[in-house]
Image (cartoon, rainbow, N blue to C red):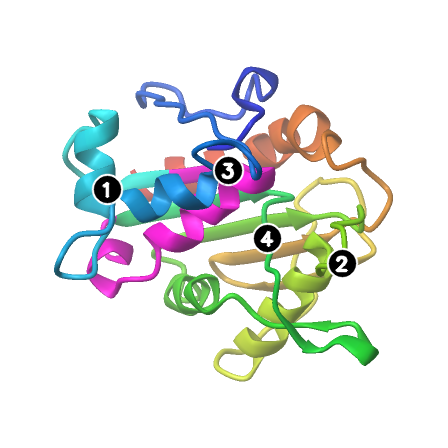
């Protein structure tokens, strides 16, 4: 999900149907508005998403780049929806407008991403996110938000530096079984997380995980 679906060749799983939902952060409707349009009376969004996109029954792999992360974080807000998601893969898609302490450049963590990552930390599910330091107006960068997610997640589960698994070296990394968080700073452009880095992430982490659990 996001503006870069045509740019992520190689970021897919063999034999698994792929459904793209293109959106932009400032579109009409925006990624956030699309995600909110699926909200039902029980607080879930995934049933509406399945209907709107014609998704098959069964566990889902949610992948997003850029503003598409606003859809994913909404789809992970309800625990019943999270239970249907086998994996989440974000290519510079960890964005928020909230600060915990702006003077110290501390972004607010995205609660639904923290919740899903905590559930994936045991290894039965997968959470992978890369982030950049590309400016985001007056809001936190993807890297600042990823650090906030790691900070909050680390208060719940044990994290270490994590394995690189053959990936290019990031500036910082955090990991714990099914969780892999990579801050690449300025080493890749914002777009490069989808066009250059995502195929490497899928080859090194996502496909091997998928083959193990299936």
- For the residues labelled 4 and 1, say whether their Cβ atoms are less than 8 Å apart: no
The spot of residue 199 in percent (x, y) is 61, 27
Magenta segment, which residues? 62-84
Which numbered circle lies on residue 138?
2
- In-image side of 163 versus 73 (left or right): right
Q: Earlier in the sequence, mark 3 or mark 4?
A: 3
The spot of residue 38 in percent (x, y) is 25, 44
Relative to 138, say whether 192 is above or below: above
Task: Pick whichever, 158 or 45, lies toward us.
Answer: 45
- In-image side of 81 versus 101 (left or right): left
Which numbered circle lies on residue 59?
1
Q: Quadrant of residue 95?
A: bottom right
> Alpha-carbon distance for marks 3 and 1?
17 Å
- In-image side of 187 versus 40 (left or right): right
Q: For numbered disc 1, what is the local secondary structure?
A: loop
Residue 83 magenta-drawn? yes
The spot of residue 202 in percent (x, y) is 55, 33
Q: Earlier in the sequence, mark 2 or mark 4?
A: 4
Which residue is depicted at the point 54% across and 84% down?
A: 155
Relative to 106, say whether 75 is above or below: above
Q: For numbered disc 2, what is the local secondary structure?
A: loop
Q: Is residue 212 visible?
A: no
Residue 78 magenta-drawn? yes
Which numbered circle lies on residue 64?
3
Q: Earlier in the sequence, mark 2 or mark 1?
A: 1
Q: Quadrant of residue 16?
A: top left
Q: Which residue is mark 4?
A: 94
> Alpha-carbon distance for marks 3 and 4?
10 Å
């Amino acid at each position: 999900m996001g503006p870069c679906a045509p740019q992520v060749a190689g970021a897919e799983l063999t034999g698994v149907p792929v459904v793209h939902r293109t959106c932009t952060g400032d579109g009409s409707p925006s990624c956030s508005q699309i995600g909110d349009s699926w909200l039902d009376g029980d607080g879930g969004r995934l049933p509406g998403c399945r209907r709107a996109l014609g998704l098959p029954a069964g566990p889902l792999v949610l992948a997003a780049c850029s503003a598409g992360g606003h859809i994913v974080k909404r789809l992970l807000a309800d625990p019943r929806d999270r239970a249907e998601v086998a994996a989440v893969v974000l290519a510079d898609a960890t964005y928020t407008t909230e600060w915990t302490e702006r003077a110290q450049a501390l972004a607010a963590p995205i609660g639904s991403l923290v919740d899903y990552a905590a559930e994936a930390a045991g290894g039965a599910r997968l959470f992978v996110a890369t982030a950049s330091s590309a400016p985001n107006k007056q809001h936190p960068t993807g890297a600042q938000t990823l650090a906030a997610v790691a900070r909050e997640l680390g208060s719940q589960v044990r994290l270490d530096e994590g394995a690189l698994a053959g990936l290019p070296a990031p500036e910082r990394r955090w990991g714990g079984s099914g969780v892999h968080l990579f801050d690449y700073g300025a080493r890749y452009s914002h777009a490069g997380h989808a066009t250059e880095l995502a195929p490497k992430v899928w080859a090194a982490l996502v496909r091997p995980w998928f083959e193990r659990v299936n």
